[in-house]
Amino acid sequence: MRLHPISWVMWALGAATCALLTRNPLYLVLIGLSAGLVMLTAGTRTQARSWQQLLKLGAVVWLVTIPFNALMLHAGKHVLLHLPQTWPLIGGNITLEAVLFGAAAGLALWVLLLIFSAFNIALDSSELIRLIPPAFYQVGLITSIGLTYVPQMLKSSLEIREAQRVRGHRFRSWRDTTPLVMPLVTSSLERAMQLAESMEARGFGGSGQEQTTRQQLFNSLLALCGMALLVAVLGIQLWLRQYPWWLVGLFVLALGLLGMAILRQSRAARRSRYRPRRWHSVDTLLTAGALIAAASMLAARIVGGTHLQYYPFPPNGLLPGFTPWVGVAMLFLALPALVSLALAPAPPSRRTEEGVPQ
């Protein structure tokens, strides 16, 4: 049984919220383990392999952040080595605290990339487009094309690499990547031309609206007033640095104007109707797990838990803090993996010629 697209969106939002609210490496490891299990169980081995290249690139970026922070931040008591003070920017002490701080920052970026990869493997882009309001169908289609570009490019690079290796080419250094880059660019351009022709044949860019000029103008004015009021409310809040009741009312009014404009535009847009996906109890369980994880992290942040951040410089210690109930809540993000394993069909038993299982 396939899970509902909304449940996957809620899982991705919950996991990303948890990863953005903390820099504690212990919590980030738990989030990363949960997202990794989801990535391995949500899709096929080929899909996971296509995203492994992007994760490797993210790991390289992670490793680069460690020496960068170590060379730029010279605070800390545990000195690993000392560079001459005459060297600009990097001169000074290279401390263990700076190395650990850079490793935690890079880990947060890599965990977000892992969540993004798991979400793209689990949810097809066509199902994601159906969740977008009809008023934004063009934006949604363009966004889905952008999201599918990365896995298609990675898959093409793997196929080209294997074909070149069969022909006897060996990739030893960056100078040997020309037989990989040129076919990849050519195939990407061909795919872009085919996509443009197919979109043109299907009438992309047409009106698709059943509205008069006056109705379209009214909807545009609603959206413009809502956006202008929202920007004004945000500016006033930054100036006052507080939330009076009338400012909250203006914020609600701005959201209402924007929602009305989107609703009117969506009703006028013509859109094909598909058979709706049913919502099952498993989807409720997955959504509840994501909400529990995000709510626990938000509650810990509101209460004032300094353990969510990791700052190993004095007077703090090198070891990060840890609250057990927050760590347990992060494990709820692994519920999709457990559900996929529980709902996976059992492998057929091997039988002998007499029909008795071995």
Image: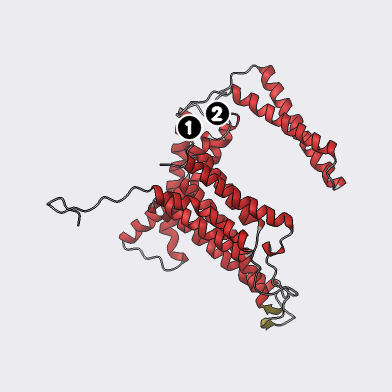
Under mark 1, the amino acid is Met
Q: Quadrant of the N terminus?
A: top left
The disc placed on residue 83 is none
**Residue 357: x and y, percent?**
20, 54
**332 displayed left or right of 351:** right
Question: Residue extending furthest left?
Answer: 354
Which residue bears the numbered disc 2?
205
Q: Secondary structure at mark 2?
A: loop
**Residue 356: x and y, percent?**
17, 53
**Residue 265: x and y, percent?**
63, 25
Give the distance between the C-alpha atoms of the residues marked 1 and 2, in whole angstroms: 9 Å
**271 displayed left or right of 321:** left
**157 displayed left or right of 234:** left
Residue located at (85% from left, 41% from top): 244
Q: Quadrant of the C terminus?
A: bottom left
Say whether residue 182 is visible.
Answer: no
Mark closest to the chain's N terminus, 1 or 2: 1
Q: Secondary structure at mark 1?
A: helix
How is the model colour-coded?
secondary structure
On screen, residue 150 above or below 202:
below
Say whether residue 100 is visible.
Answer: yes
- Are the two marked residues, 1 and 2, in contact with CB atoms closer than 8 angstroms? yes
Q: Residues within 10 Å of mark 1 (few under 14, many from 20)?
A: few
Under mark 2, the amino acid is Gly
On screen, residue 43 above or below 101:
above
**Residue 242: x and y, percent?**
84, 46
Q: How many badges with numbers are in the image?
A: 2
Residue located at (51% from left, 55% from top): 35
Q: Choose top left, top right, bottom left or bottom right for residue 313.
A: bottom right
**137 displayed left or right of 319:** left
Which residue bears the numbered disc 1?
199
